[in-house]
Image (spheres, grey):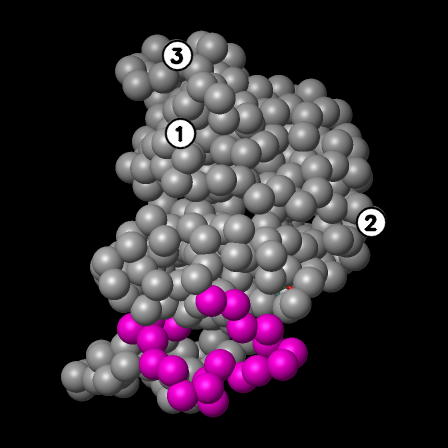
Amino acid sequence: MRAMVQHAYGPPEVIVPQEIAKPSPGSKEVLIRVHAAKVGPSDVAFRKGEPMMIKLIYGWSRPKFPVGGTELAGVVEAVGQEVKSFKAGDRVLGMSVKNFGAYAEYKCLSEESPLAMIPDGIAFEEAVGICDGGATALTFLRDKAKLRKGHRVLINGASGAVGIYAVQLAKYYGAEVTGVCSAANGALVREAGADYIIDYSLEDFTKAGKAYDAAFDAVGTRSFAACRRALTPKGVYLTTAPKLSIVLQMVWTSLFPGRRAVFATAGLMQNQANLAFLMELARNGALNAVIDRSYPLELLPDAHQYVETGRKKGNVIVKL
Ligand SMILES: NC(=O)c1ccc[n+]([C@@H]2O[C@H](COP(=O)([O-])OP(=O)(O)OC[C@H]3O[C@@H](n4cnc5c(N)ncnc54)[C@H](OP(=O)(O)O)[C@@H]3O)[C@@H](O)[C@H]2O)c1
């Protein structure tokens, strides 16, 4: 089968096309013919092997799993004899966070992995786009910030994949939403549902005198120290960026009442219920995919190059 592989860490050109063996499903696995997969900052980090922690976990001198990609959507082609919840022909959305493998024609996933049916009317690339960003935003806003009707929430980086779904989810939960983005992306973020827009090149939201119940730094460009000025007395600062400082602040602020700092490895915390919930929101129109660019699988290096600019809006997808 066709796949894009990388046998070394490095620039986008380390990803090359290769014919590899088609997998066959184990007794508790489903074999998926992949139609779409997402490309995001985490895929860029794995391709480069940076930060160093990635090499420690996924192979020091070269990647242990040469086929990258975590979020995928496609059609179930076959199932193992013990699989009960899925059957051949099902349109599914899945995540492969442990051993990747989305950038190939076929991928086997355990029946237990984050895997959900895609509703009729939702395209493969839309499903995978909503999962990229939507799943992370859901974990931060619903589970960590416990967002409720009437909460004031600020989303920093509202035009990125995490941010644009965070805006939509926050509206779904009945919050008043302020999106922080560039002027060029203001209309996109407003269309996603933001009540207020702050252009980060003109105004620093941490000094604007407004307090939020939750400030979600979806792009990880602002610190807790700065954002605490913009929180209500019991407000929470949430960030997607893994840093030692946020881990220490998280522990420290959990010991006392008052403003809290939260980081989560949301990408690793997904399950079938979350994916099914996102697909239900897509079906009823509460979540809409925002796809910036789609590339054919063979142009995966170009997709990486674009994602690495840090300027993408919503999702970048590769299609097979
Ligand atoms: N913790 C987790 O489990 C987890 C899960 C998923 C993702 N992440 C991380 O979350 C981060 C965001 O991912 P993503 O896919 O949403 O990123 P992304 O789509 O690549 O972010 C790009 C967007 O960020 C905007 N942006 C750039 N600098 C900004 C700034 N200073 N202020 C406000 N907006 C800015 C850009 O808009 P302009 O071009 O207009 O500036 C662009 O639209 C990444 O670091 C990713 O690794 C973490």
Residue at label 1? 283
What secondary structure is found at the residue carrying circle 2? Answer: helix
Q: Position of residue 298 (x, y in %)?
A: 78, 33
Q: Amino acid at mark 1?
A: Arg
Q: Position of residue 252 (x, y in %)?
A: 27, 85
Tell me which image quadrant ligand 1 sits in: bottom right
Q: Nearer the viewer, mark 2 or mark 3?
A: 3
Q: Mark 1–mark 3 contact, CB under 8 Å?
A: no
Front-most of 163 and 221?
163
Q: Is residue 309 left or right of residue 170?
A: right
Q: Quadrant of the N terminus?
A: top right
Q: Is residue 202 visible?
A: yes
Q: Position of residue 311 (x, y in %)?
A: 69, 60
Q: Is residue 70 visible?
A: no
Tell how many labels.
Answer: 3
What secondary structure is found at the residue carrying circle 1? Answer: helix
Q: Amino acid at mark 3?
A: Lys
Front-most of 137 and 111?
137
Q: Earlier in the sequence, mark 2 or mark 1?
A: 2
Tell me the number on the disc at residue 87. 3
Residue drawn where x is 55% and y is 26% of the image: 123
What secondary structure is found at the residue carrying circle 3? Answer: loop
Q: Earlier in the sequence, mark 1 or mark 3?
A: 3
The segment highlighted magenta reads 196-215
Residue 116, picture quadrant:
top left
Q: Is residue 123 left or right of residue 6?
A: left
Residues at marks 2 and 1, CA–CA distance in whole angstroms: 38 Å
Residues at marks 2 and 3, CA–CA distance in whole angstroms: 37 Å
Q: Nearer the viewer, mark 1 or mark 3?
A: 1
Q: Nearer the viewer, mark 2 or mark 1?
A: 1
Residue at label 2? 13
